[in-house]
Image (cartoon, rainbow, N blue to C red):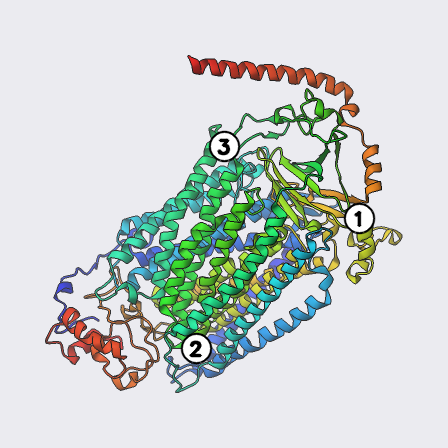
Amino acid sequence: MNGLIITLVTVLMLAIFLIVFRLSNLASILKNKGKNAEEIDTATNNTHAYLFLILPILATVFTFWYTAKHLGLWGQPHAVAHGKSFDSLFSVAHIIIILMFLITNAALFFFAFKYRYKKNHKATFFPDNSKLEIIWTIVPAIILTTLVFTGWRLWRDVTKDAPENAIQIEVMGKQFNWIARYPGNDNKFGGFNFRYTDDVNELGLDFTDSKVNDDFQATELHLVKGKPVHLKIRARDVIHSVGLPHFRQKMDAVPGQPTKMWFIPTKTTEEMREELKKNPEYMKPDPSTMKGDPKDMKARWETFDYELVCQEICGRGHFSMRMRIIVHDENDYKKWVASQKPFVENNKEYVVEAIKRQQKMKKGEKNVSMQESSQKIN
Amino acid sequence: MASVVANPHDVHVHEEHHEHHDSFLTKYVFSTDHKMIAKQFLITGILWAFIGGLFSILFRLKLGFPEMDYAWLKPLLGKWVALQENGTGQLDPEFYLALVTMHGTIMVFFVLTAGLSGTFSNFLIPLQIGARDMASGFMNMLSYWFFFASSVIMFASIFLEGGPAAGGWVVYPPLSALPQAIQGSGAGMTYWLVAMALFIASSLLGGINYISTVINLRTKGMTFSRLPLTIWAFFITAIIGLLSFPVLFSAAVLLIFDRSLGTSFYLSDIYINGQALDHTGGSAILYQHLFWFLGHPEVYIVLLPALGITSEVIATNARKPIFGYKAMIGSMLGIAVLSFIVWAHHMFVTGMDPFLGSIFMFLTLIIAVPSAVKAFNYITTLWRGNIRYTPGMLFSIGLVSLFISGGVTGIILGNSAMDIYLHDTYYVVAHFHLVMGSASFFGMMAGIYHWFPKMFGRMMDDKLGYLHFWLTFVGVYLVFFPMHFIGLAGFPRRYYEFSAYAAFRDSIYLNLNSFISVAAVITFGAQLLFGFNFFYSIFRGRRATSNPWNSNTLEWTTPLIPGHGNWEGQIPYVYRWAYDYSKPNAEQDGFSDFIPQNVPYTMTPNSNLPHENEMIAIEKEEMLGEDTTIETLAHLAKTK
């Protein structure tokens, strides 16, 4: 039924369009009879000129009003040490480009309006002017250089090596979720090999390495306020990307090529929620809680969480590849760490079997490599 | 130019006339006439544009209305709409990715490379430089038919069991290398790679032809410093393409090896679907370097022809010389050189050495300077002009605005520090759709409206053109401007929906996305007006005059519908640049507000600038006979 209605409406609209088109064609033939076809229709020409003047003004006014009305929404709130310098660079750069955008577009549309066709008028022959061209080569160059240097300093700070005292966490992406691994009491990660991976040992841990024994895993990322965190990032199937909008960080997770990032969280999840309570944009209800019982309805600040966003296309479930991040204060973090059990302890029977398998595989590898080297000698 | 009396140009008199009687097959199908090949590229490009546009509508509906019932699209999409128990249908998430991928591939390569550069380089190079045809008509024909074969394969891939390629238009491995990772990486990806290999062959055949034609076949007097900016743009574009497409080819070939022959160029340490693969030692990032070595110049391959067309259309319709002709060429050359050394700004967060990131940030921001110069020059060309709003002119002004609006955000994204936050968000989508997608699309439209009379001897309907422009111009801004806002909020690209994240759950974001989708549907609808106008006017449009826009370039000196060989009789000589519009005192020489390129300075003693008067002696010596009189010159320049 729907299909029929849609088809009928489309056919009807097409018919109307064709009739109007035909009639207007005939009308214009009658109107222009005896007129020189080359002559320019000043009225139509002026219409375009006025539209070029009016539409941009309306659009600009509306856009500024709308932007200002929801100012709290453009940009996620940040909770990271370099967030302030990031956001101020971001604001300054945006003010500069908005000015550039407004000035050049204004000139373009104003000239388009002002110098519209007038009968018996002749344009000014103005083929070049070196002074002007030098000015508008140099001015953008200076503005850009300033921006580049500010950006470069921040980039250098953000990408330099993590401090020694940083909390080490391994983050591994796979289709379609993230797994975090903490190094445990020894503060050292045990080794891994992608060939050891299976449904239980999702990280491919090497259980013959004793450092692995106290490593524990989590499906949520737990961080400490005020303490640098160093993420060692890898992927086991396709490229994923660790996007941390609230921490102004992002880094791809690439199979076969480990990457890293570090930052210092500055607000716990609770503190952030308290802060957002005051932001009118976050007092509105969270749309996802509006479907069920009205009693369950929650405001956006209540459902706020730091999140890891997968930001590189990775397949069917790309859009749902989220990991929740919880920032604790020092005490809560210690409590949480204490409550975690190492993977090896949780899967004792499995690990016994796995060690056997892994030792066998290692022997096999050795044999293969010995064969290879003996072949080379031969 | 039917008969040339008292011709001092002995050399060209015996030029052959190319008056064959073609069969349907040689005239319309396997034609070696550059004008027919251009039309073939154009019509194929238009068809592709509708397909690519339709795909974007299909996924925009999902983004704008996440709860929408897709059941009514089941007849079109078949198994890609999964029916729920209650009878409503949902778009398959993998097919969503396939739509996104094909939209990008089609628009970037098939529409804005082949459809734009293929059409206008083919059509305008011989006509504007005064040549009978391309250097090699046969290679030119091959170029189209390689493109056609590529199109057929790409089109066929849409109907494959597992769907077309779905790894994003950049098809990064391992996702694109492993059929286990996503269905589209099976046969769909094989078709994609084969189609792209053919496409690259087509581009190279075309590019070599464009370059050699511009270098070798210019008519007498058409020096490089007198070439219209369109030709400069096509020439530089062809060089960029010739240098960068082979690198994409190598990337594709290595990917084919990894997929089919078990090599490990891009693959390493992969465990997928319960299986550890044997590949070790490859680098997924290597592919990205190779891809973006083409990928970034590709942006300019798409954009420069549009800018070239705009230069010509703006100058003609503002009735003014293009401002800073030499600066325009200089900035295009600058852009061309720089475009090869900025590719890694697409890769700031791939784990590439941060130091390398700094280098690429510096280089990237340098490229903004020549781009800014071009924008300023367009604006100054309008200053104190006498602007006629033809549909072509409207689209050209639209292009300049979009070029600026999309360009300024490049300054943010090229800055590696700020790119961290914005990489792969809708901010990027907004940026490149404005500066590359829409701007180039507007350039293409400007070109079609402007040169339609030369292509088909008829005019397109003005009123429909105006309506098409205003709906498209407003529509494009309404679609892409709000994307900046959701981009600032961190919305990632290529997401099927956003509901999993607390950060993206706000009714305002939802509204913006719905708004964008509605605007997209309307904008797409406006293109149907164009489609109708185009095909209707080919057969029923008002008959054109020989030079409807009062333009200076050589193509308007040909017969209304030029045959194969373009000019009957000899090819006109060129004596001046293409931008003598509204020259002071031209009236005293008997000209109105334009003096075509084939008018010698000898004929325009009153309007000549001092250095041009000096040219008269050279003209007499090199171009004309000693006994040349004003009368013979008048015969030469019949176009007036």
Position of the C terminus of chain B by quadrant = bottom left
Circle 3 or circle 1, nearest the eye: 1
Q: Residue at x 74, y 29 (%)?
A: A186
- Labelled disc at residue B388: 2
Q: How many other residues sit within 10 Å of disc 3, few (<14), some (14-19) or many (≥20)?
A: many
- Element carrying mark 3: helix
> What chain does badge 1 belong to?
A
- Element carrying mark 1: helix
Q: Quadrant of residue A16?
A: bottom right
> Quick one: B606 or B134, which is closer to the camera?
B606
Q: Residue at x 75, y 39 (%)?
A: A220
Residue B39 visible in the shown view:
no
Position of the N terminus of chain B by quadrant = bottom left
Q: Is there one chain holding both mark 2 and mark 3?
A: yes
Q: Amino acid at mark 2?
A: Arg
Residue denoted by label 1: A269
Q: Give the distance between the C-alpha atoms of the residues marked 3 and 1, in whole angstroms.
A: 45 Å
Q: Is there one chain holding both mark 3 and mark 1?
A: no
Q: Amino acid at mark 1?
A: Thr
